[in-house]
Amino acid sequence: MNAPSVADVENLLRDPAPAGDHVPSPTHEVELAPGREYLRKLAVHGWAVPTWPVEHGGCGATEADAAAIRSTVASLPAPDLYAFGIGMSIVGPTLLTHGTTEQQQRWLRPIATGDRIVCQMFSEPDAGSDVANLATRATRDGDVWSLQGQKVWTSRGMYSDWGLCLTRTDPDAPKHRGLTMFMIDMRQPGVTVTPLHQMDGEAHFTEVFLDGATVSDADRVGDIGQGWAVAMTVLANERAGIARGRSAEPKMFVLPSWLRALAERGDLDDRVRRDRAMRAFVNGRVLELTARRSAAEARSGTPGPGGSGGKLRIVRTFKERAELCLDTSGANGMLRDDSAADDFLLSPSMSLRGGTDEVQLNIIGERILGLPSDVRLDRDVPWTQSRNGLLPPI
Ligand SMILES: Cc1cc2nc3c(=O)[nH]c(=O)nc-3n(C[C@H](O)[C@H](O)[C@H](O)COP(=O)(O)OP(=O)(O)OC[C@H]3O[C@@H](n4cnc5c(N)ncnc54)[C@H](O)[C@@H]3O)c2cc1C
């Protein structure tokens, strides 16, 4: 397959968007409309999610062709696609691995066209890094499950039509084995979504309260009790997605805009700053090359633990650049509409999302380097005993 040229993509984006089937949400329709129109146009050729099969809204591209398509598409202006990201880069690929054919037919195309937005509902007040400790219960009555519990840090929760929700279906099983994954309808009675306000002024996180929300057994993703395996695929896709964003062909001799801005302002005349800038620049380039290698290695199947290394490097590069740009922006760095201030305030969250730095180091230590594993006394103990620290004596 030949990747599209810039002219191909430009022509496509000039055409009117095909009709979609989105049911308008009362609050966010206006801000979501430009992204939705853009994705509908890209979906005509499968360029929003190039590696997905044609029947699900992609174009069946290899990872190499997909990288070229993404790079061409990214070279043209695009609306804000933030709200659509989890569906396209995390939940969609997970459904390709664990969803039934019928589920893939129902869910994937509306995600690719932006007609439906999805969030990922794992974390809870007592289950972050130790997400297998979660307490949201799903109880079965015939073909319907009823959900009770609370999720937190649910990104894009307020925009979402559907939520990929990890629940506990067997509290008497050890914590990893009693979990089941569902795709739930976020716009039903029994689901309350409350925004959480961040220090950068945004409110893209939410708390989600589930109080008698229901989900059909036909919307269970994976087998009962196999939710942990599905969750691992989600997290691997999340890390790979972060790295993939950096895997476009590096433009070795083109300065990134942040570095050009520093140079134009004369901020690189100072030798110490110049040294910091070059370190951040080189780290960024190494990151792009590493991401390309990981993308090539992950050509087939679910991404492996290697994404953890990529994620750690992204965090480091982002923070180095954000701190340098803030330092050089002087009093402007205190202004809310200054991009340096924005990136600086965003940077601590990079170490948390998709699993903390410490958790990535654990994954690398255990699964890549083969080091002895973390102490896990609760692995084989019923969750009802282990959740409150009621472990049996050693
Ligand atoms: C921007 C952003 C977006 C997010 N989006 C979502 C989302 O859409 N859906 C969702 O479900 N969640 C989301 N999260 C939640 C995120 O996954 C959690 O914040 C993360 O897993 C850490 O959990 P916690 O905050 O409860 O911290 P804790 O797990 O309580 O960790 C506290 C500290 O202890 C350390 N620690 C914990 N366990 C270990 C260990 N075994 N070894 C070494 N150190 C350890 C951690 O590294 C951390 O420094 C998001 C978070 C952020 C910041």
Image (spheres, rainbow, N blue to C red):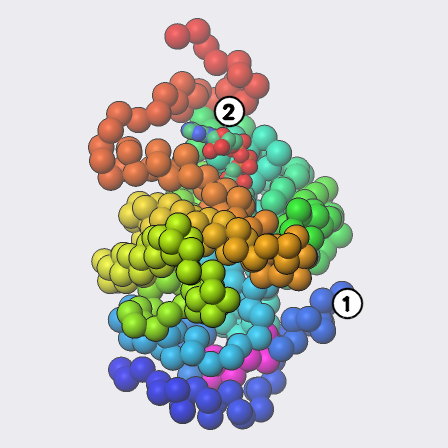
**Dominant secondary structure, magenta:** helix
Asked if 106 appears above or below 20 in the picture, the reply is above
Q: Residue furthest top?
A: 393
Expressed as whole percent of the image width and height from the top left, the position of residue 147 reads: 65, 42
Identity of the residue drawn at 70% across and 48% down: 197
Whether tag 1 and tag 2 are in contact, CB under 8 A, the answer is no
Which is closer to the viewer, label 1 or label 2? 1
Amino acid type at circle 2 is: Trp
Residue in the foreground of this view, choosing between 392 and 257: 257
Residue 169: name its quadrant: top right
Dot 1 or dot 2: first in sequence order is 1
Expressed as whole percent of the image width and height from the top left, the position of residue 309 reads: 32, 46
The residue carrying mark 2 is 383
The residue carrying mark 1 is 26
Asked if 119 appears above or below 147 in the picture, the reply is below
Asked if 366 appears above or below 199 in the picture, the reply is above
Q: Residues within 10 Å of mark 2 (few under 14, many from 20)?
A: many
Expressed as whole percent of the image width and height from the top left, the position of residue 272 reads: 39, 50
